[in-house]
Amino acid sequence: MKALFSVLTLVLTFSATSQAQTVLTKQDLLMNSPATHQKVVGLKDFRVVIPGVLYRGGNSGGGPIPLKDVGLKALAEMDFSAAVYMYPYGWAQKPADTYGINYSFISDTRNRASQKEYLMKIKDVIENRKGPVYVHCWNGWHASGEMASYALMQFCGFSNQEAQAYWNANVPKGDANKIMRMSRFQTFDDLKISAEDQARICPR
């Protein structure tokens, strides 16, 4: 009952619509501003990346497992349309009921085809104005930070250097391999969004 009350309380202050109206600047992301953080029952280190479009974090307990029932329910209550788990590990433990969330996993974040599959989900949300995507790993740090950086480069015009600055400000420990991939990442020409959509969603 306590957990349910917490979720309902959160829903009163958070929705995809209200977050889309949040004025978030590029500096907020690069400086790890408190404006990018929210507490959500069942999720760990929940952060806004692109308001109304993309959020990142971990599962409630960390470790190699997907989201638990309470985390998926919280996302559904906040009108999220999709969630993406950054690993295949423990996928069999996923709850049977995902509360209408399109929940999937990526088998290998190093793979360009997997990166594109993930970015296609975000493009769909942007262009069709669906509920946002929650991208998560275990603790909400490394894999989700890497994939958030790719989205900022693909859809919001961040340079590779700015994406690395975002990583450095928002991830507690470095990962040389992920930093190298961010430095070499090239956007997908066929996943570009319109200038109007970019102006509507992206931190300035």
Image: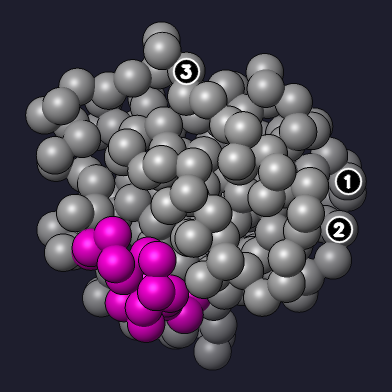
Kindly identify which numbered label has been placed on residue 30.
none
SS assignment at label 1: loop
Mark 3, residue position = 188
SS assignment at label 3: loop
Distance CA(mark 3)–CA(mark 2): 30 Å
Mark 1, residue position = 89
Mark toward the start of the polypeptide (3 vs 2) = 2
Q: Residue furthest bottom?
A: 2
| Quarter of the rendering occupied by the C terminus | bottom left
Q: Are marks 3 and 1 in contact (CB under 8 Å)?
A: no
Question: Which residue is painted at 24% across and 54% down in the image?
Answer: 203
Q: Nearer the viewer, residue 180 or 190?
A: 180
Whether the magenta-drawn stretch holds residue 183 is answered as no
Q: Residue furthest top?
A: 190
Q: Amino acid at mark 2?
A: Pro
Question: Which residue is painted at 84% across and 66% down in the image?
Answer: 63
Q: Does 9 appear above or below 184?
A: below
Please state the horizontal and vertical placement of residue 69, each as a whole percent of the image: 66, 60
Q: Amino acid at mark 3?
A: Phe
Please state the horizontal and vertical placement of residue 143, each as a whole percent of the image: 69, 52
Mark 2, residue position = 64
Query: What are the residue bounds of the magenta stretch?
Result: 24-40
Q: Quadrant of residue 24?
A: bottom left
Q: Amino acid at mark 1?
A: Tyr
Which numbered mark, 3 or 2, is in the foreground of this view?
A: 3
